Image (spheres, rainbow, N blue to C red):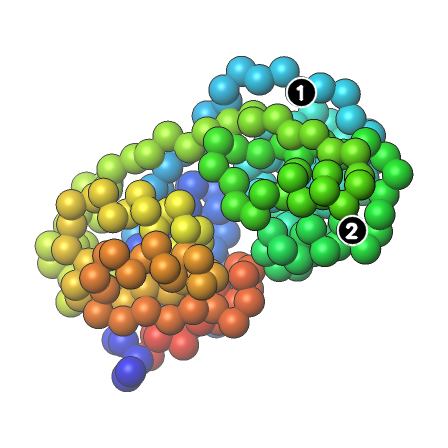
Amino acid sequence: MPRLDNPVVLVTRPRDSAAQFVAALTQVAGPFCPVISPAFETVAVGAEIPPFEAVIFTSRAGVAFAPSGQDRPAYCVGSATAVAARAAGYSAISAAGNADDLVDLILDRAPSESLLHIRGEVSQGNVRDRVQSAGLTCTEVIAYRKSTLTPTTEAATAFADAQNIIVPVFSAETGSILATWYVDFSKCHVVAISPAAAKSARDLGAQSLVVATAPNMAEMVAATSRLIA
């Protein structure tokens, strides 16, 4: 498809993460109009974090709801999560991919420490079960949930007025939330972080859909920038 002139880029990540994405996209893309309208916010569920020797993080949100690292090992799904974990005091290792890559990393390292997966109510990949099935000691705790949000006034105006809208979708769960927004995605162009995210985003009925070549922010930035003139 041809590149879009000064499109709206609707970023539905939580505000801090959305701002980071916009900043990175600004460095490599042509002119665009960023609109930040989070699809959800993360809230604590009041769970007690049990003792652990090493931790598994499948999102940066997990890091936010974890205790300080005290230099304990942290197995992280991607580089952004690993950066957050290091900032929280963990000795972090990144799988640089998805849940399957994370499980492969853990099984390859075969840690002797007791593992704890700190996750949200919805989590992809059955990480704890697969690690346990391989004979490692692993438990999990649900520390947070996603509270869905509706479009901001700015986002609603963009849907009503803009001719070209790019919507990066960073998870399958986000795609499912966007499908409840009661807005017209037919003139939008979706950039999905993974095949799973693309599958959920198909229900939006967007004009086009592309999948990033790898499930990380850098490739989402690259895939989005390729749509901008």
Q: Residue furthest right?
A: 112
Q: Residue furthest left?
A: 160
- Please name the residue shown 11% across and 58% down the image: 161
Q: Are marks 1 and 2 in contact (CB under 8 Å)?
A: no
Apparent side of residue 159 relative to residue 138 in the rendered image (left or right): left
Extreme-bottom residue of the structure: 2
Residue on which disc 2 sits:
107
Identify which residue is drawn at 58% across, 34% down.
119
Label placed on residue 49: 1
Residue 152 or residue 167, whichever sits in front = 167
Q: Three-letter amino acid code at disc 1?
A: Ile
Q: Measure how far apart labels 1 and 2 are at the Cα level.
A: 23 Å
Residue drawn at point x = 66 percent, y = 38 percent: 128
Residue 76 lies, with reference to residue 104, above or below; the image says above
Residue 178 badge = none
- Please provide percent x and percent y for residue 127: 63, 43
Residue at (35, 75) in percent of width and height: 227
- At which x and y percent is residue 92? 76, 45
**Vertical placement of residue 170 versus 64, above or below:** below
Count of numbered circles on the image: 2
Bin the neighbour count of mark 2 within 10 Å (Cα to Cα): few under 14, some 14-19, many 20 and up: some
Q: Is residue 60 left or right of residue 187?
A: right
Mark 1 or 2: in front is 2
Q: Is residue 27 visible?
A: no
Residue 28 picture location, percent across and down: 48, 72
Image quarter of the C terminus: bottom left
- Judged from the image, the secondary structure of the residue bearing numbered disc 1 is loop
Q: Is residue 62 above or below residue 1?
A: above
- Residue 15 in the image: x percent, y percent? 42, 41
